[in-house]
Amino acid sequence: METLRIIYQIMLRELRILRQNHIYRFCMVLFPVLVIFFFTSIMRDGTPTNLPVGVVDLDNTSMSRSLTRRLDGFQYSKVVARYPSVTEARRAIQRNEIYGFLYIPKGTTEKLLASRQPKISYYYSNTTLVTGSMLMRDMKTISTLGSAAVGQATMRARGLTDRQIQAVLQPIRVDLHQIANPWMSYNIYLSTVMVPGIIMLFIFLISSYSLGTEFKFNTSKEWIALSGNRIWVAMLGKFLPQTIIWLAIVFGYQWYVFFHLGFPHQGSPWMLVLLGSMQVLASQGFGIFAFGLMPSLRMSMSVSSLWAVLSISMAGSAFPVMGMDGALQSLSWLFPLRHYWMMYQICVFNGFHLIEAWFHFAALAAFMLLPWLVIKKIKNAMLTYVYIP
């Protein structure tokens, strides 16, 4: 009972610190909430649509105009301008007025009808990878449709039925089934890694910051004395209020994206609770561990921020880890976000049993236990180190 009373007193002390220091208010509540709404709002449509493209139609026939109308009818492309030359269209791309253009040279229809294989060119900017890949697919499809239209008309004139024509033009029909994310929504697979990654960044920083400020404001000896010189009691009382706040933020984010916005999730709500709890505790464990390795406010926060930023690239959401260099594949196991992402993919997104992600579960548990490796060093630093700006 005495230990619980001491932990309670330290928690009250920590709550006073949280209330008095505006950094906690901004970094633990305001900024995480803004990040949640920012990312989920900016990609609320799922995928970008009506991307501006241009057309250079030097043929100006009914067939070339038909191709232009078909391109404009695609979901991702919107024809916003027609240019008299390739040079003008290229300058429009450089001015960021369009993302690409379709070039139909003079005599295209005539060569198609004579079966002389005319060339239809398309140009697109791949500066933005997503935009470039979408427009490339649309314009490539248009180029294919041009030859198919002529072939269809020729075979129909020869008396072939629509079924026979379809068998020649498309001998293999693709039956596409996109599992778990059939809408191809970038919001579903980017927000679910970017938002937790940034929240973990804030947890890293605040965990290191809250220990470093004990040095900075010369309150470390008072804090240790209040715990009866027991560092584990001091740490428990200090980080419990932070843990409760972080859990509220993470569970609020999960409710918002999975139940309000309707992001697909096959796992049970208890799996979401487990995943969110491990996210918070593993992040706090890493932040405390970073401070224990380098008991310096500046250095520990620098390491925490660097590790958090790198983890977004090493998680494997934007670029698969299996495609990375061997050394980077091994390094990816040292990032908590990587294991969080894999547990989410396996247990929540695809609905498999937790046993399928046991290694990632064990890795997050190991991050939670990291502070025990440096807890004595933290106590020694609190009692003997002098703050150096």
Image: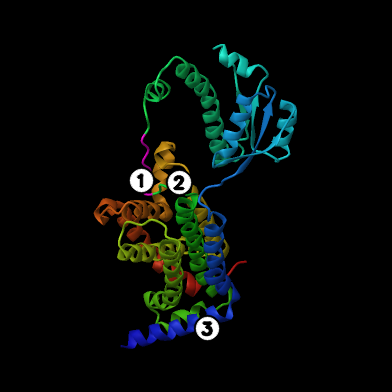
Q: List the residue tagged with mark 2.
A: 184
Of circles 2 and 3, the one toward us is 2
Q: Residue at x 33, y 53 (%)?
A: 360
Report whether 323 appears left or right of 74.
Answer: left
Q: List the residue tagged with mark 3.
A: 16
Q: Residue at x 35, y 53 (%)?
A: 349
The amino acid beneath tag 1 is: Ile
Of circles 1 and 3, the one toward us is 1
Q: Nearer the viewer, residue 183 or 27?
A: 183
Circles 2 and 3: CB atoms closer than 8 Å: no
Q: Nearer the viewer, residue 139 or 25?
A: 139
Chain-order first, disc 2 or disc 3: 3
Q: Name the chief secondary structure element in magenta.
A: loop
Real-space Cα distance between discs 2 and 3?
46 Å
Q: Which mark is residue 179?
A: 1
Secondary structure at numbered mark 1? loop
Chain-order first, disc 1 or disc 3: 3
The amino acid beneath tag 2 is: Met
Chain-order first, disc 1 or disc 2: 1
The amino acid beneath tag 3 is: Arg
Instruction: Judge the density around disc 1: few (<14), some (14-19), many (≥20) Cα neighbours within 10 Å.
Output: few
- From the image, which quarter does the C terminus lie in? bottom right
Real-space Cα distance between discs 1 and 2?
10 Å
The answer to whether residue 384 is above or below residue 296 is below
Report whether 161 appears left or right of 217.
Answer: left
The answer to whether residue 283 is above or below residue 88 is below
- From the image, which quarter does the N terminus lie in? bottom left
Secondary structure at numbered mark 2? loop
Tell me the colour scheme of the image: rainbow
Residues rendered magenta in the picture: 175-180
Residue 13 belongs to magenta span: no
